[in-house]
């Protein structure tokens, strides 16, 4: 497995793979890899001849009061995981390599990015779309892999690829969870033991919603209320949002019809966690 910090080196290798007729998969990450990332890499390795894992904590997608400075890093651990899963290359650029002096071009989107996490984190998806489109231009993969835990990100990137005619298949993979249901996230490491216990309320609220839908309830307000009441009953937790939206437009729906996204975000202390349930795919 190669490790490189430079765009030039990535391009040289991808070009050589292309000359041999090989397919290329990309797994974009911000590092501190966990089993969720591992499952993306595993799938990418299965479906492509060569796999590039990018590890870059993208400053553009963090708000001023967010955790950019404390975002966890473990490059040695990440390298082991990538090698053990069969990745061909890690691309680990510096901030300067990605955003050279004078950088002033962004990939932005309207509509899909003003709801859910986009509402709580203004500018976040502009940062995500910009870095992901840069990574797509650098690696030019056949396929790129993202987790459904960040469902809005998946929808936004699929739309970006469609709107900008990028010839890349976006593969969305199932959320990987801890045994008590908490979705794997690099940010889980911030939680102390009390907060960790309280964090399961997020999955509990979504499970209640899922059961209500399974029992035939379709009125969004009833299910949304159940999610909000469940989360609000946990004293350690502050609700950011609990919303039910159409999976394509990400706009709120009154009546739940497949495919719908039930998404919630909470704060536990300083830590923000998100999770979702997708009905009908
Ligand atoms: O999901 C993430 O880790 C990031 O948003 C991504 C896609 C790597 C872009 O920085």
Image: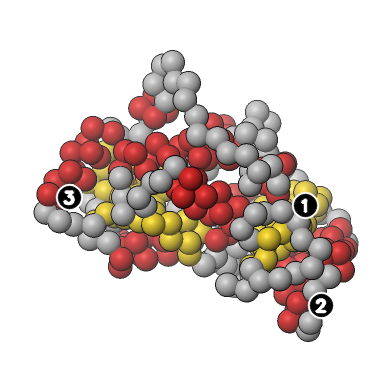
Left or right of 77 in this view: 268: right
Question: Where 35 falls versus 258 (above or below)?
Answer: above
Q: Position of residue 64 (x, y in %)?
A: 65, 28
Foreground of the two, 180 or 50: 50
Q: Position of residue 25 (x, y in %)?
A: 32, 55
User: Could you tell me if the residues under marks 1 and 2 are in contact, i.e. CB atoms within 8 Å?
Assistant: no
What residue would you read off at disc 1? 241
Q: Is residue 187 visible?
A: yes
Kindly identify the residue that appears in the image at 49 percent across and 53 percent down.
158
Measured Cα–Cα span from mark 1 to mark 2? 21 Å
- The response on whether ligand 1 sits within 8 Å of label 3 is no
Quadrant (top left/top right/bottom left/bottom right) for the C terminus: bottom right
What residue would you read off at disc 3? 18
Q: Position of residue 32 (x, y in %)?
A: 47, 48
The quadrant holding residue 140 is: top left
Q: Position of residue 16 (x, y in %)?
A: 14, 46
Q: Estimate how packed mark 2 is, as few (under 14), some (14 to 19) or many (20 or more) residues with alpha carbons within 10 Å.
A: some
């Amino acid at each position: 497995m190669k490790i490189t910090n430079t765009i030039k080196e990535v391009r040289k290798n991808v070009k050589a793979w292309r000359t041999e007729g090989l397919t290329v998969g990309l797994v974009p990450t911000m590092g501190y890899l966990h089993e969720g990332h591992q499952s993306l890499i595993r799938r990418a390795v299965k479906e492509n001849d060569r796999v590039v894992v990018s590890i870059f904590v993208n400053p553009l997608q963090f708000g001023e009061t967010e955790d950019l400075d404390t975002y966890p890093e473990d490059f040695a651990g990440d390298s082991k995981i990538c090698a053990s899963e069969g990745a061909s290359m890690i691309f680990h650029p510096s901030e300067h390599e990605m955003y050279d002096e004078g950088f002033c071009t962004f990939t932005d989107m309207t509509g899909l990015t003003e709801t859910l996490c986009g509402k709580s984190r203004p500018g976040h998806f502009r940062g995500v779309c910009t870095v992901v489109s840069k990574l797509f231009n650098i690696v030019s993969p056949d396929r790129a892999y993202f987790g459904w835990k960040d469902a809005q990100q998946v929808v936004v990137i699929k739309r970006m690829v469609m709107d900008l005619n990028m010839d890349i298949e976006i593969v969305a993979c199932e959320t990987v969870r801890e045994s008590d249901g908490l979705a794997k996230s690099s940010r889980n490491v911030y939680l102390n033991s009390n907060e960790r216990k309280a964090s399961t309320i997020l999955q509990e609220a979504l499970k209640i919603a899922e059961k209500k839908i399974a029992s035939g309830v379709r009125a969004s307000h009833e299910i949304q209320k159940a999610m909000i009441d469940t989360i609000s009953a946990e004293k350690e937790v502050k609700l950011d949002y609990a919303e039910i939206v159409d999976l394509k437009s990400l706009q709120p729906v009154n009546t739940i019809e497949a495919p719908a996204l039930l998404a919630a975000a909470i704060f536990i202390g300083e830590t923000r966690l998100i999770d979702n349930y997708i009905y009908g795919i």
